[in-house]
């Protein structure tokens, strides 16, 4: 593909990740093959909303050298593994999509795919865990692609989807989310949303108003999986890399009391509250809303692994390491 066309398409694809619910904030990354040696890839830590073709990085797949004003995505090794492993790879999406992330925690064996779905996905595999941005992760992804699969779930870390072109890659990403959502266990029934006994609207509005008097940038979610986890009364431990990075090792549960919430907010930025859901606060409205999405994702994964009888929380060391790197590097980059 012409380099200018590739740059424009990749920058626009970042916004498509957001609009299709396949990623949030700066999570995930996109690339397009330019030729046998070069690809165009999204830069590290830059928000998609204002990304332009000039921000896209030109990367040599053989040497790892890059050209541009910004550094390439830290997951460039994952993209290189896809292009090296699959001759027909023309476009690569690394997503943090919700239900695929949950299924990646328990394995793909329980997925039931029709012949048409399996053909449309181009084969499905699961890559073993590796910390974000590491050679180990890239190597594990390369092994997964070596069997010919064009869609690879990353344990604890989303998915990598390969297509011949932009359209096919996005079609596969959306189909993957549909089949994973169908297989996700332990989720509240949709019909509970009409009159949920675990949600107290008056209490929620009152607490949010009180908390906003002390913290400027506050958001909350009363999504059904969040309400279910809050009612369950157990602290949520980090199972996914993005929760570890942006939230930390746990999402605590506190009683529905203004002072109790404020006390926890001195150390934590997200809490589960029975009858309310989850309340989050950060330095910006954008981050607070993104954190609520992460809490929803974490709760969906928690309910799924619980229903499957699988204990999949991250180690204390890995969680602390990812959180420290995020605070030192990526959070500052995202805020400019």
Image: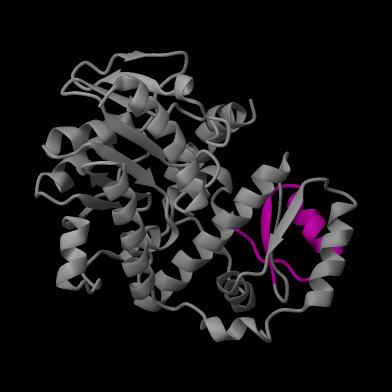
**What residue is rendered at 44% in x and 26% in y?**
43
The percent coordinates of residue 91 (x first, y second) are 27, 38
Query: What colour scheme has been applied to the protein in the rendered image?
Result: one colour
Task: Name the residue: 10% across, 49% down.
Answer: 148
* Extent of the magenta region: 251-273
Q: In the picture provided, is 22 more to the left or to the right than 278?
A: left
How many numbered marks does the figure carry?
Answer: 0
Relative height, residue 175 to residue 170 (above, below): below
Q: Is residue 259 magenta?
A: yes
How far across and how far down the image is residue 67, in percent?
36, 12
- As rendered, which of 104 and 2 lies closer to the eye? 2
Tell me if residue 160 can be seen.
no
Q: Locate the C terminus and report the quarter of the image it occupies.
A: top right
Q: Nearer the viewer, residue 317 or 94?
A: 94
x, y (%) of residue 61?
Answer: 22, 22
Relative to 179, does residue 333 appear above or below in the rendering?
A: above
Q: Residue at x 59, y 85 (%)?
A: 192
Q: Is residue 95 left or right of residue 128?
A: right
| Left or right: where 92 falls relative to 208 | left
> Which residue is depicted at the point 71% across and 79% down?
199
Q: State whether residue 80 is above or below residue 259.
A: above
The quarter of the displayed image where residue 163 is located: top left
**Can residue 142 be found in the magenta stretch?**
no
């Amino acid at each position: 593909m012409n380099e200018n066309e590739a740059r424009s398409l990749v920058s626009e694809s970042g916004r498509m990740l957001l609009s299709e619910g396949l990623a949030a904030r700066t999570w995930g990354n996109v690339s397009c093959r330019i030729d046998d040696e070069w690809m165009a890839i999204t830069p590290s830590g830059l928000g998609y909303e204002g990304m332009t073709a000039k921000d896209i990085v030109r990367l040599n797949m053989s040497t790892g050298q890059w050209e541009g004003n910004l550094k390439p995505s830290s997951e460039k090794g994952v993209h290189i593994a896809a292009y090296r492993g699959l001759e027909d790879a023309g476009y690569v999406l690394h997503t943090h999509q919700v239900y695929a992330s949950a299924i990646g925690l328990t394995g793909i064996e329980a997925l039931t795919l029709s012949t048409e779905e399996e053909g449309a996905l181009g084969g499905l595999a699961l890559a073993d865990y590796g910390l974000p941005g590491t050679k180990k992760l890239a190597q594990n992804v390369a092994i997964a692609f070596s069997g010919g699969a064009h869609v690879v779930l990353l344990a604890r870390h989303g998915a990598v989807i390969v297509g011949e072109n932009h359209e096919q890659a996005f079609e596969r990403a959306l189909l993957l989310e549909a089949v994973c959502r169908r297989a996700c266990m332990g989720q509240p029934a949709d019909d509970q949303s009409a009159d949920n006994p675990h949600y107290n609207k008056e209490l929620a509005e009152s607490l949010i108003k009180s908390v906003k008097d002390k913290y400027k940038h506050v958001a909350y979610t009363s999504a059904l999986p969040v309400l279910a986890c809050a009612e369950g009364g157990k602290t949520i431990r980090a199972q996914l890399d993005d929760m570890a990075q942006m939230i930390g090792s746990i999402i605590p549960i506190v009683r529905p009391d203004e002072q109790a919430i404020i006390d926890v907010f001195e150390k934590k930025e997200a809490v589960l509250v029975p009858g309310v859901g989850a309340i989050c606060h950060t330095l910006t409205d954008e981050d607070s809303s993104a954190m609520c999405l992460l809490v929803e994702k974490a709760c969906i994964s928690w309910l799924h692994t619980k229903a499957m009888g699988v204990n999949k929380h991250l180690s204390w060391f890995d969680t602390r390491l990812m959180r420290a790197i995020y605070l030192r590097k990526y959070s500052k980059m995202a805020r400019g």
